[in-house]
Amino acid sequence: MPIVAPSILAANFLQLQQDCNMLNESKADWFHLDIMDGRFVPNISFGIPVVEAIKKTTSKILDVHLMIVEPEKYIDDFKKAGADSITVHVEACPHLHRNIQQIKNAGLKAGVALNPHTPICMIENVLLDIDMVLIMSVNPGFGGQTFIPHTLHKIKELRKKLDEVAPEVLIEADGGISLKNAAAVIHSGANVLVAGSAIFHTANPTATIGQFKMVI
Ligand code: DX5
Ligand code: ZN
């Protein structure tokens, strides 16, 4: 069964408590929290106080996706706010190995994210140090974008490589994931499905989460 991680970016911020309650009562596995700084990506989302507030509503895993420059400055703050895993972008980390160590030393799961144009070989030398690779299936910065089909080849290539060296490392697909493409994403080798619009912008988010869990 895939791990389903609804993206809070698509929630209704005026009723965040209700939306969190809905996720708690649903089959959602993780809460996916998209942090954007207006520098690494051309958009600003929400920050540490919101992560802290969400933590108080749930015992589910908080999967924090940092789309920010200099993420090393904020690892401890996000840990204190309640992050269980932190994913940083390879494109934002000239000292990626050190940044991964910092996340692991903080006692958190460490993920590395790749933009659509970034080849898998960029993370070849850290595959043994991480818990997860996040493959962006849209250009990061906004919810509601269209899935980039080339992502499927990328996931297959990564899964093949991981099976050789670190099969336990999870692949998380993020951006434009819907019930239409979820099966192809899972068949390609992904383990975690992030979905924002496809969950929150439907008539029955709880039922949609259930349908994502049934994807094989
Ligand atoms: C995009 C974010 C995604 C986004 C997904 O930069 O990383 O997590 O919220 O939203 P949808 O599912 O609407 O593409
Ligand atoms: Zn994300």
Image (cartoon, rainbow, N blue to C red):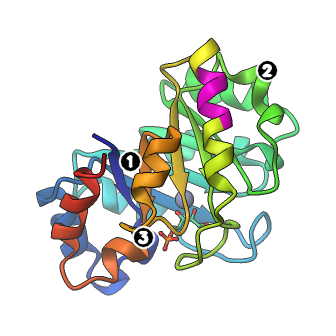
Q: Amino acid at mark 1?
A: Leu
- The vertical placement of 116 against 45, above or below, is above
Residue receiving disc 2: 125
Q: Which residues are magenta?
A: 157-162
Q: Which residue is mark 3?
A: 196
* Circle 3 crowding by C-alpha within 10 Å: few under 14, some 14–19, many from 20: many
Label 3 residue SS:
loop
Q: Position of residue 21 (x, y in %)?
A: 16, 65
Name of the residue lying farthest toward the left: 25
Task: List x then y, in percent, for residue 61.
Answer: 33, 43
Under 8 Å from ligand 1: the CB of mark 3?
Answer: yes
* N-term mark: 2 or 3: 2
Residue 63 visible from this viewpoint: no
Amino acid at the residue labelled 3 = Gly
Cα–Cα gap, marks 2 and 3: 31 Å
Foreground: disc 1 or disc 3: 3
- Distance between mark 1 and mark 3 Cα atoms: 15 Å
